[in-house]
Amino acid sequence: MKKTLILTLMIAVLFVLSGATSFSADEVTPAGAPPVFAPGQSAPAQTAAVGTAAASGAPAAPQQPSVFGMLPFMLVMFGAMYFLMIRPQQKRMKEHQSLISGLKNGDEVVTSAGIIGTIAGMSEKVVTLEVSKNVQLKVLKSQVNQVVKGPIKDIQTNA
């Protein structure tokens, strides 16, 4: 929710900074669109009116934005996505890799499936967890989610 609000505010600020004045589709006519005439006005009268408006110093129709005009907007959007999505994910991945590399026999761990056990053995990709006396499970090392600090006796039930 917080990230969405920040992103929405950034888009609004960029919209204002880009010089846009309205969201209205009436102001922009697509290139190649047929001219629109006012009721009761013929085509030559309108072109004459446009010609006199241009000669009198009236502002011209807005031009299409160039690629270079949109470049700062795209760069800011990429920066926002990097800091809101990519960077936190990389940080979590780095923390998980350090957790996995620091595993040793005897550590009490919780897997991503919620299995609680003590590491009884390890290989390069597989961890053997002892979940109860003489009950061992083999799980992927990457599925170990956290190392439990302190005893986990209060979590286990008498089975």
Image (cartoon, rainbow, N blue to C red):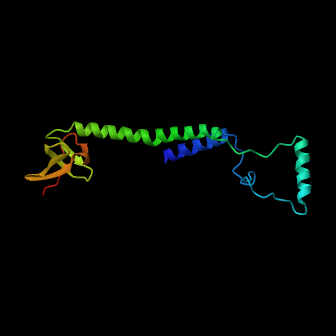
Q: Is residue 118 above or below residue 72?
A: below
Q: Is residue 95 above or below residue 139?
A: above
> Relative to residue 109, is residue 46 drawn left or right?
right
User: Could you tell me if residue 68 is visible in this image?
Assistant: yes
> Relative to residue 143, is residue 77 drawn left or right?
right
14 vs 124, nearest the viewer? 124
- Tell me what residue is drawn at x 88 percent, y 40 percent: 57
125 vs 146, nearest the viewer? 125
- Tell me what residue is drawn at x 89 percent, y 47 percent: 51
Q: Is residue 112 above or below residue 94?
A: below
> Relative to residue 147, is residue 72 drawn left or right?
right
Residue 23: give x, y in percent of width and height: 69, 50
Image quadrant holding the C terminus, namely bottom left
- Tell me what residue is drawn at x 49 percent, y 48 percent: 1
User: Could you tell me if residue 153 is visible in this image?
Assistant: no
- Tell me what residue is drawn at x 7 percent, y 52 percent: 134
Q: Is residue 42 above or below residue 58?
A: below
Residue 121: give x, y in percent of width and height: 12, 44
Give residue 39's quadrant in the image.
bottom right
Residue 71: give x, y in percent of width and height: 60, 38
Total label count? 0
